[in-house]
Image (cartoon, rainbow, N blue to C red):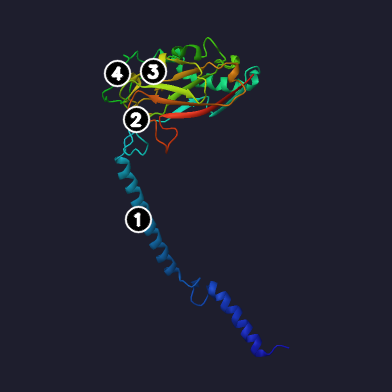
């Protein structure tokens, strides 16, 4: 049987454990009195309110330095990249099977919706050959130069709704990325080459793959809300000897001060893609 001393020690340990949570003799909860808890909670309340106020003040001052139309700090490169549509760097299809190229046709048709004449008629009929510079106004809204999809001729999807894919002569659309304030010099145009012994004929739309300077500069998403990038369409005139082969095509922006030979960035002023047509 347990001794009287053991029972007393056990009772004392139990009492000590309970007192660490709440001590009825001193009125302490977790080792602090009510007034002590009130003071420490008040301290943290004031401390965190001060931090929240400092954060709000910092954000307010930072927002005062921002411009809704033009970003103050631009970490993007000063030269645009070049991208293609359909949005794939590996284009492969069977020209005899509509299901195999339907995804490319649907993508091009969807992409060109904003270039429909019914939308572009609302835009400005700008003067070709020079930058379309616009002064700041109160609303900061900029006008947009008209680019009709009909200017892409046989690659517009208007006369040929399959964009040449059904005949094994596909159309590829190219555009430059938007960069605020970009004003390319010279007479920029897009030129494509295929790494192949025998050259392949290509048709460019608009004529000679020109990217008219009247579509520059771009003033930003908010100021230039309805802006659409100028396009260049390349129709690859493939023949039977080109079918069932994976061809590598490289397109570059030429004729201007835009960079297209940076080995660290394969998409800076150029783009390389592969295409394979199965007969």
Say whether marks 4 and 3 touch (CB < 8 Å): no
Task: From the image, tell me which residue sits under label 2.
Answer: 180
The quadrant of the rendering that contains the C terminus is: top right
Q: Nearer the viewer, residue 240 or 271?
A: 240
SS category of the residue bearing label 4:
loop
Q: Residue 166, how many percent across, how many down?
A: 60, 15
How far separated are the C-alphas under marks 1 and 3? 59 Å
Task: Decide if residue 100 is on the left or right side of residue 201.
Answer: right
Q: Nearer the viewer, mark 3 or mark 2?
A: 3
Residue at the image point whose x is 29% and y is 40% from the top? 65
Which of marks 2 and 3 precedes in the sequence?
A: 2
**Which tag, 4 or 2, sits closer to the chain's start?**
4
Measured in 3D between alpha carbons, the distance from the residue under mark 2 to the one under mark 1, in whole angstroms, is: 39 Å
What residue did someone put label 3 on?
Answer: 210
Measure how far apart labels 4 and 3 are at the Cα level: 13 Å
* Placement of 169 over or under 13, stated as above or below: above
**Residue 5 percent across, percent down from the top left:** 64, 90
**Mark 1 residue element:** helix
> Residue 50 shows which numbered tag?
1
Quarter of the figure that contains the N terminus: bottom right
- In the picture, the disc for residue 130 is 4
- Residue 232, position in %: x, y? 44, 19
Precedes in sequence: disc 4 or disc 3? 4
């Amino acid at each position: 049987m347990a001794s009287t001393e053991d029972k007393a020690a056990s009772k004392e340990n139990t009492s000590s454990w309970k007192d660490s949570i709440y001590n009825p003799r001193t009125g302490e909860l977790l080792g602090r009195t009510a007034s002590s808890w009130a003071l420490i909670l008040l301290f943290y309340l004031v401390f965190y309110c001060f931090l929240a106020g400092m954060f709000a003040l910092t954000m307010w001052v930072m927002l005062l330095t921002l411009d809704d139309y033009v970003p103050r700090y631009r970490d993007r490169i000063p030269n645009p990249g070049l991208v293609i549509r359909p949005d794939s760097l590996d284009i492969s299809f069977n020209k005899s099977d509509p299901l195999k190229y339907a995804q490319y046709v649907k993508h091009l048709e969807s992409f060109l919706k904003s270039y429909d004449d019914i939308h572009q008629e609302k835009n400005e009929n700008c003067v070709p050959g020079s930058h379309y510079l616009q002064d700041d106004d109160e609303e900061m809204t900029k006008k947009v130069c008209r680019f009709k999809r009909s200017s892409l001729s046989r690659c517009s999807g208007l006369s040929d709704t399959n964009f040449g894919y059904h005949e094994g002569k596909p159309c590829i659309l190219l555009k430059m990325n938007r960069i605020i304030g970009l004003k390319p010099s010279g007479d920029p145009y897009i030129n494509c080459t295929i790494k192949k012994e025998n050259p392949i004929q290509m048709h460019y739309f608009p004529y000679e793959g020109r990217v008219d300077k009247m579509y520059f500069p771009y003033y930003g998403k908010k100021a230039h809300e309805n802006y659409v990038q100028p396009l260049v369409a390349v129709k690859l005139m493939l023949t039977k000897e080109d079918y069932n082969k994976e061809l590598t095509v490289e397109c570059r922006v030429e004729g201007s001060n835009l960079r297209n030979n940076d080995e660290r960035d394969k998409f800076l002023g150029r783009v390389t893609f592969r295409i394979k047509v199965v007969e």
